[in-house]
Image (cartoon, rainbow, N blue to C red):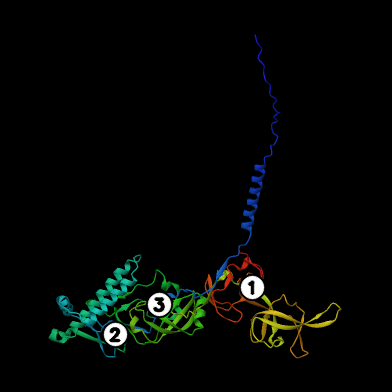
Amino acid sequence: MEEKNNKITNLADYRPGKLQLNPGIIIFAVIFVYLIICIIMYFNTKHIVGYEVVEGSLSVPNVYEGIAIRDETVYNCNGTGYINYFARESEHVACGDLIYTLDSSGKIAEMMEAQAEDVLFSDRDLSDIKNDLIHFQNSFDGKEFEQVYDFKAQIDGMTMKLSNYNMLSNINTVLGSSADNVSFQYSPASGVVVYGIDGYEDLSPDRVTKEVFGEERKAKTQLEANQLVSGEDKAFKLLQSENWSIVIPMEKARAMELLEEEYVEVKFLKNQYTSWAKVSVLDNADGTYLQLDFTNSMITFATDRYIDLEILYRQEKGLKVPNSAIAEQEFFLIPVEYRQDNGAGGTTGTFLREAYNEEGELVTKKVEAKIYYADEEHYYVDTSNFSIGDHICMLDSSQKLQISKVGTLIGVYNINKGYADFTSITIMYSNEEYSVVKSNTTYGLSEYDYIVLDADTVNVDDFIYE
């Protein structure tokens, strides 16, 4: 029996738990740690973002709802009977003009009902109705469907009054001897006649509150013809002055800004007409209100208590910059007479500063300093060129001045040259996000300059890396 030769192979000992270092694992670990560090640095580093300055203006909300305050007198019915109006609503009547009739027999009401279908409206009547329909269509809000019923009552009343006007013009001929039962009521004064009562006739500007603009505002009562009335019922009201006001609730700061204008131009949204109003500010019981005083257009809005309007406040164009880009910086104030180059202009000025040399001798040295802004008395210069307590000398004089005054400028960081260069700005007006500043000033911005979008991400003279 042959023996089989068994070949024995030596195997290295395997020791559990011993780490086997692999170059690939080491490289991967290094890359992973590097990525983690880069991510952490990215989220902890302020990123500099540029913004191109362009010309523009700010969109300021200028549309408001105001309440009309007028010289209004309400008159009660002068007797009992069926009332029928003769004067057209929203028209001017003279003292002694016929306003309405009171018919104690009711015959006029019967006549009106019998002839209602035969009444023909004039072109002017139809034009008035058409204008009201167009205005309602443009202003209708589907969320407030009750406006439909108010408008229906308004049109019904208007057509009834127009119908009555056309038929009552021949009242004496139609009634004959029955005219003795009709009482004719005439206007006690001149003014604009209105047949709607809302309870705000005695309201004065200083008593306006937010309640009159809320959901609990008083409803308007439209006085209708051919109704049986008594002496306690309202007959009509008369607006006797062309001077009237609109009062608007408004934030204090905005109201004071408009007050500085004294007069503002207003556009009425109802008909797109414009008019000028005198501005005043009211500090009423529950807040600030803007009062706009008019000397015309009252008759156009005689039947409207609440009026939508737009204040056409001046909107000067300038350079539009984000508010996030605006920063403040301190500068030394140096009187203009201490400039050595005679104020020749430009953004760099020469000043003569006293200093001690290496030998301890007091000498004067010319310093070229960047000027960031100038007014009639001072230059605003960079603080890196001087120190508090330094002395500067006046041109062609032995007079000296110790630097001590510091001023603050508002500006942005211009990055046209690759570093953060502070540039002063003059803000004309602002909103929550943007400001409009003057363009092409001596020390300011120009259109298409690049600035830092977030001023908190840089310091002065920081280099900007693309």
Crowd band around label 3 with a 10 angstrom C-alpha radius: few (<14), some (14–19), many (20+): many
- The residue at which mark 1 appears reads as 421
Near-viewer residue (401 or 341): 341
**x, y percentage for residue 209?**
45, 75
Q: CA distance from mark 2 to mark 1?
A: 66 Å
- Tell which circle, 2 or 1, labels the residue nearer the N-terminal end: 2
Near-viewer residue (20 or 256): 20
Question: Disc 2, disc 3: CB below 8 Å?
Answer: no
Q: Amino acid at mark 2?
A: Glu
Task: Report whether residue 136 is seen.
Answer: yes
- The residue at which mark 2 appears reads as 91
- The residue at which mark 3 appears reads as 309
- Tell which circle, 1 or 3, labels the residue nearer the N-terminal end: 3
Q: Amino acid at mark 1?
A: Asp
Near-viewer residue (168 or 368): 368
Task: Report whether residue 177 is seen.
Answer: no
Of circles 2 and 1, which is in front? 1
Q: State whether residue 83 is above or below residue 41.
A: below
Q: Residue at x 44, y 77 (%)?
A: 248
Quadrant (top left, top right, bottom left, bottom right) of the C terminus = bottom right
Q: CA distance from mark 2 to mark 3?
A: 23 Å
**x, y percentage for residue 442?**
60, 82
Q: Residue furthest right?
A: 359
Of circles 1 and 3, which is in front? 1
- Tell which circle, 2 or 3, labels the residue nearer the N-terminal end: 2
Of circles 2 and 3, which is in front? 3
Q: CA distance from mark 1 to mark 3?
A: 45 Å
